[in-house]
Amino acid sequence: TINKVSLIEIPKVHDERGFLAVVEKDAIPFAIKRVYYLYDVPTESSRGGHAHKEQQSVIIALSGSFEVIVDDGNNKKRIMLNKPNQGLYIPTHIWREIDNFSSGSVCLVLASTDYDEAEYIRDYDQFLLSVR
Ligand code: TYD
């Protein structure tokens, strides 16, 4: 459910030379299998628009900002990400859309699975059937 969607604080090290953030084993609730990122996304674009049967993920605004809409079929939330040391944990069976990308933003996704189109749910009605 949407209650399992949570913001994760990524530990950072700061000194006069700047910040260094570390995503290590204990920071996120799964083992990372794949990393991908969205960049040069036009502001008017909407990304995502799917849920996953298997994949859990953590989304990080490495640069700039964007908004993530999460939806468990009963409840929806819109969350702005704009801090490179903050991650949004998304469990399985959550519909997500990402929009309002700022210019130059980078959306990093840490994923628990290899890419497998078969574990995507890309049809919203099918998603509702799967969670209700
Ligand atoms: P898509 O799922 O539409 O991206 P978004 O998460 O923004 O909705 O993926 C866009 C294309 O990229 C689609 O053809 C599938 C492909 N793709 C891969 O080949 N490997 C991957 O790891 C991912 C995430 C996507």
Image (tube, rainbow, N blue to C red):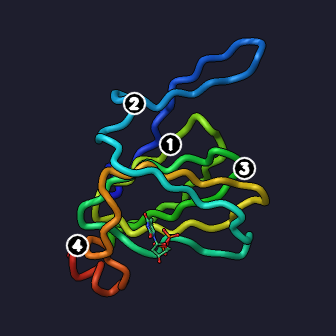
SS class of the residue under badge 1? strand
Of residue 17 and residue 70, the one placed in the foreground of this image is 17
Q: Given the image, on which type of amino acid does mark 3 rest? A: Gly
Which mark is on residue 131? 4
Alpha carbons under labels 4 and 2: distance apart: 28 Å
Residue at image point 30% right, 78% down? 127
Q: Given the image, on which type of amino acid does mark 4 rest? A: Val
Alpha carbons under labels 2 and 3: distance apart: 22 Å
Q: Is residue 32 left or right of residue 39?
A: left
Judge the density around disc 4: few (<14), some (14-19), many (≥20) Cα neighbours within 10 Å. few
Q: Given the image, on which type of amino acid does mark 2 rest? A: Ala
Residue labelled with disc 2:
27
Which mark is on residue 64? 3
SS class of the residue under badge 4? helix
Q: Find residue 106 and report its horizontal and vertical position in percent.
A: 65, 53
Q: Is residue 14 left or right of residue 76?
A: right
Alpha carbons under labels 4 and 3: distance apart: 33 Å
Residue 75, picture quadrant: bottom left
Alpha carbons under labels 1 and 4: distance apart: 24 Å
Judge the density around disc 3: few (<14), some (14-19), many (≥20) Cα neighbours within 10 Å. some
Q: Given the image, on which type of amino acid does mark 1 rest? A: Gly
- Nearest to viewer (mark 1 / mark 4): 1
- Dots 1 and 2: beta carbons under 8 Å? yes
Q: Find residue 78 and report its horizontal and vertical position in percent.
A: 54, 61
Residue labelled with disc 1:
87
- Dots 2 and 3: beta carbons under 8 Å? no
